[in-house]
Image: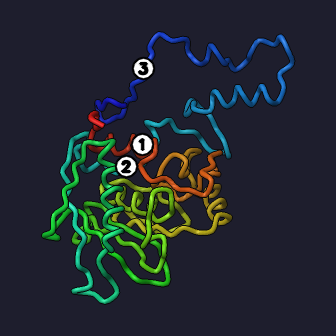
């Protein structure tokens, strides 16, 4: 899908030499007939994948996929574009802390699937290690507040820890398409060094602890308008975003992403290179 070079993600496109889309659906079509609303809708739909290029929507600049991918990473301290092997474990937290415990077997299976979804698109190999002295540790916590949180790889003793609130039923029963599985994708993203698309003003965020606290849809919509730095900062394009896909014209029919989305792929491939074998 992409070739890494110079710290940037470049996307291959098959069909070189085909008539460009701009020729088929120009901005100013031939005015043989008066353009109806429906024909303009068709033109807009055909060109909906065009990002960047000084486009604006919702009073926000549009970012290209490459720029959005770069925006979502903190890689200034690390060599990027290099493969990595990352170990993980399901720690027995209850042996040390009453408020924490191990993921259930079902949660563990879903965590492995979520890890695989990241490895499918990037040169990152995940290895389970029962020693528990691993790069990523998964665990449940019990609280009346919060949903999940994770620590970045360079955040000290807590580095790579991913925590899920066991008081939330969907965290205990994640499956492809539900909110709990989205949380697993999101927190693993943090553990492999992806940030939110920006430091949202609506929550307290720093480069070490990424706290995820979803609000109601109405509050989230307001949050997008006030805090999203660019048009495509939504869960239509990235599992690392806080804002629902309907802010940017998407509609998932009540479901949630269960694998990295297009901007996540650009970001993780910039960090680890592209997996060309899947």
Cα separation between marks 3 and 2: 27 Å
Residue at 17 percent of width and 70 percent of height: 132
Looking at the image, which residue sits at the far right?
34
Residue 44 x, y percent position in the rendering: 69, 30
Local crowd size for mark 1, using a 10 Å CA cut-off: few (<14), some (14–19), many (≥20): many
Q: Which residue corresponds to the image point at 22% horizontal and 62% vertical from the top-left?
A: 88
Mark on residue 59?
none
What residue would you read off at disc 3? 14
Please tell me how crowded label 2 is: few (under 14), some (14-19), or many (20+) other residues with Cα within 10 Å. Answer: many
Residue, x 39% and y 62% (percent of image)? 184
Identity of the residue furthest to the front in this view:
106
Q: Is residue 274 visible?
A: no
Quarter-of-image position of residue 188: bottom left
Residue underneath mark 1: 69
Mark closer to the chain start, 3 or 2? 3
Q: Disc 2 marks which residue?
A: 73
Task: Give the image location of residue 270, x and y in percent.
Answer: 32, 40
Mark found first going from the N terminus, 3 or 1: 3
Q: Between residues 200 and 176, which one lies in front from this camera angle? A: 176
- Mark 1–mark 2 Cα distance, whole angstroms, equals 7 Å
Front in this rendered view, residue 127 or 264: 127
**One can see residue 208 in this view:** yes
Cβ atoms under marks 3 and 1 closer than 8 Å? no
Which residue ends up furthest to the bottom in the rendered image? Answer: 98
């Amino acid at each position: 899908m992409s070739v890494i070079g110079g710290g940037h993600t470049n996307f291959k496109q098959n069909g070189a030499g085909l008539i460009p889309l701009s020729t088929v659906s120009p901005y100013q079509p031939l005015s043989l007939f008066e353009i109806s609303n429906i024909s303009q809708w068709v033109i807009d739909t055909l060109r909906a994948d065009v990002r960047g290029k000084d486009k604006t929507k919702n009073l926000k600049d549009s970012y290209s996929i490459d720029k959005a991918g770069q925006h979502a990473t903190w890689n200034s301290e690390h060599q990027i574009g290099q493969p990595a092997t990352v170990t993980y474990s399901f720690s027995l937290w209850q042996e040390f802390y009453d408020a924490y415990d191990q993921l259930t077997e079902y949660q563990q299976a879903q965590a492995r699937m979520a890890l695989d979804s990241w490895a499918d698109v990037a040169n990152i190999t995940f290895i389970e290690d029962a020693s528990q002295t691993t790069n990523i540790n998964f665990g449940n916590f019990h609280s009346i507040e919060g949903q999940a949180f994770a620590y970045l790889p360079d955040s000290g003793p807590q580095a790579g820890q991913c925590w899920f609130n066991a008081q939330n039923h969907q965290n205990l029963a994640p499956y492809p398409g539900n909110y709990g599985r989205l949380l697993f994708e999101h927190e693993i993203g943090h553990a492999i060094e992806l940030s939110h698309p920006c430091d949202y003003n609506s929550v307290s965020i720093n480069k070490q602890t990424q706290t995820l606290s979803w609000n109601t849809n109405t509050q989230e919509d307001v949050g997008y308008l006030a805090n999203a730095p660019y048009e495509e900062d939504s869960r239509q394009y990235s599992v690392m975003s806080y804002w629902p896909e309907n802010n940017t014209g998407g509609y998932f029919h009540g479901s949630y992403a269960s694998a990295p989305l297009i901007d996540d792929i650009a970001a993780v491939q910039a960090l680890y290179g592209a997996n060309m074998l899947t």
